[in-house]
Structures are given as C-alpha cells and as structure tokens.
Image (tube, rainbow, N blue to C red):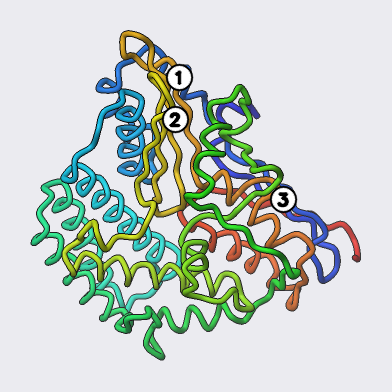
Amino acid sequence: MSLAVRDQIEVTVSLAGNAIAAVEILPRVRPSLARLFAGKSASSLLNALPRLFSLCAAAHQVAFLSAIGAARGAGINLATRQHRMTLVVAERLAELLRGLFVAHLAQDPTGADAIRALMQDVSALAGSTKANCRLALSEAAVRIAAALTALGIANEDGAPMPGSPLALRIAALEEAVVKPVPMQHSFLSAADDHDIIERLLANDVRVCHCPDLEGRIPETGPWARQMMRGRISPGRSAPAERLKARIAEIVGLCAWFKAGAHIETAQDGIVESYGLGPRRGAAAVECARGRLYHAVELDRQGQISRFECLAPTEWNFHARGPLFRSLQGAGLTARPHARAAIRRVIESFDPCVAFTLNFREVGDA
C-alpha cells in the first residue's frame, strides 16, 4: 500500500491468553500539502480547505488565516478574534455532538426526535456563527440545551440522569474488559506550541505524521482538556471517562454560548497565532479533536512557499502514543468480548476517525 494514499489508521493487536501482547499502529499518511500549496495565494486556497480537511474544517480555516496573518505581520482586531474563536467553539460543539450520536446514540430509538432536533439546532448554531449574531447563538444554544435535557443531560456537571441512554452507556463502558497497565499521562497544551512549531518548520518530513516532543507523545482532545482543568479523575475505565469528558465539555460549551459567547470568558488558548520573523507565521487552534497546528512561509510576492499542518489525530493515534499506551500490555477480564472491547477503546479516542482493526493470536502470555 502506498504511504501517500493511506487515509485510514491501521491497528493490529496481538492477543496472548488474557492479555494484549503487542500493539502495532500504522498512522494515516496523506499526500504532501506543502507541494499542493506551494506557489499559490492564500485567498485561492481558503475555499479549498473544507474539501481537503473533512474533519474540523472551520478550525483548519481559522488556523490557516491566523498563520497567514502572523506571517504578514498583520494585527488582528477584537471583532475578528471574537468571530474566529466563536467559529472554532461552535464547530467543536457540533463535532462533539456528532461523535456522541455516532458512537453512543445512533441505535437508541427512544431518543430519535431529540437527536433530530439536536442536530438541527447545531446547524442553526453554525449558521448563526457565520453571521456573528450573539443573540442567535444564545437562542440556538438554549435549544441545544433543551434537546440535551430530553436525552438525559440536565445537570451542570454533565452527569446523565439515571436510567437515561447515556447513563446506561456509561455503566456498560465501566464494565471494563480491557484493564490497562498503570501509566503516567501526558497532555498537549499551549505551553508546547513553540516547540512544535519549531519542529514543523525544521527539515524533518516525519513531524506531520509521526510527531514527538523529545520522546514524549502527549494526548490531546476532550479528555485531555478536562484532565488539565482538573474536572475529572482518570478513573478505572478509559472509554467511560472519555465519554464523560465529552459530555462535560458539551455542557460547558452550551453554557458559554447561552451566556453570550464573550471572548473574556472563553478558555485560554483556543486560537493562538505566532509571528516567526519576516514572512513566517504559525497558529494553534483547540478544535474538537485536540490541538491543531498550521505553519507557513511566504515568498517575497506574498505567495505560499511552505505550508505545514499537524492534526491532533497524529498524536492520539501515534505508533507509540496514547492509544498504544492504553492497549499495550493490558489485561483482558472477559476474553470472548475482547475484540469488541478493544474497538470501544479505540473509538473512545475519536469516534469519527476511520480505522481498521486486525487481530493476531500469538499463544499464551
């Protein structure tokens, strides 16, 4: 298989008795965007970004515009900052809700009406964001909150009501079949931005699909964000805790929109841009799946001479990253259900990322 066209992550798990003996992860590798972007103007590429990045397209657009602006040395006014941040957060909410539906609610016939209303209101939220209308944003967020209540998410802390579909789903996930070995967790944050950007603009072609920070492969995304804010405990079941983190973030984002989506009350680091000297700039955006990076260099005519992108998926599904650490050496409490349980672990990192899962039997551990 050509590395240039592998768009799915491949996970191979070797089972030995009641344990996972080995985990191999082949990250996705896409054609070089640097060659595709070179020599083109920023304006000609902006409309192409949603076609190039099917996941978190708005976050990619904001990262691209912010990096280009930093490379040009252009300042950014408060209204533009507000609009870009609101666009990113609205998309984050929409993507988290989509993941909740795809992974946990699609088969629940009792919540079909609430889910349909929820997705309609999310679309309205995105449309209101384009118009930058705070009242419309707030009204859409109120309707989303009502739809979440119908699904059993009425508490401010995001804990589903007892007996609701999501509460039952969490309880099922807490029946952990995969028992990971104790590990030290590491999380990607804005404090890592300068180091990552420096590596992106160095001459190492592996960074965009196999990144590391001096051997550290941190996790990024909803669970990492909640952990860094001290909102949740690692607990005993990673899939259950990651689902709780997604729900808690959804509730928090809805509350932010209902309160008026003010930039002063937003979380730190959602959109950051960095000027790196003449005609060089970068940006970091905290999107649904984690921290996203764009870095650019412009030629003397203002055309793009270099473009680099690092998506959060490349950290979480790194060959030695968070998913690998969650599975490698883990014990299996119910061997007949191991395959389904391992799939749930993978999906808990991102239910919307495409992957293939293979198994090998290697004898007893």
The Cα atoms of the two marked residues, 3 and 2, are separated by 32 Å
Query: In the displayed image of the protein, which residue is found farthest to the front?
Result: 277
Q: Quadrant of the C terminus?
A: bottom right
Q: Amino acid at mark 2?
A: Ala
Mark 3 vs mark 2: in front = 2
Q: Quadrant of residue 136?
A: bottom left
Q: Where is residue 254 shown, x and y percent of the image?
A: 26, 68
Mark 1 vs mark 3: in front = 1
Q: Where is residue 304 shown, x and y percent of the image?
A: 38, 17
Q: Residue at x 32, y 84 (%)?
A: 155
> Mark 2 and mark 1 in contact (Cβ < 8 Å)?
yes
Please tell me which of labels 1 and 3 falls first in the chain.
3
Q: Residue at x 21, y 49 (%)?
A: 82
Q: Amino acid at mark 3?
A: Thr
Query: In the displayed image of the protein, which residue is found farthest to the right?
Result: 364
Q: Where is residue 107 shown, x and y percent of the image?
A: 40, 71
Callout 1 environment at 10 Å: few (<14), some (14 to 19), or many (20+)?
many
Q: Which residue is mark 2?
A: 295
Q: Which residue is mark 3?
A: 12
Secondary structure under tag 1 reads: strand
Secondary structure under tag 3 reads: strand
Q: Which residue is mark 1?
A: 306
Q: Where is residue 348 shown, x and y percent of the image?
A: 54, 63
Please tell me which of labels 1 and 2 falls first in the chain.
2
In the drawing, does residue 141 fall left or right of residue 243?
left
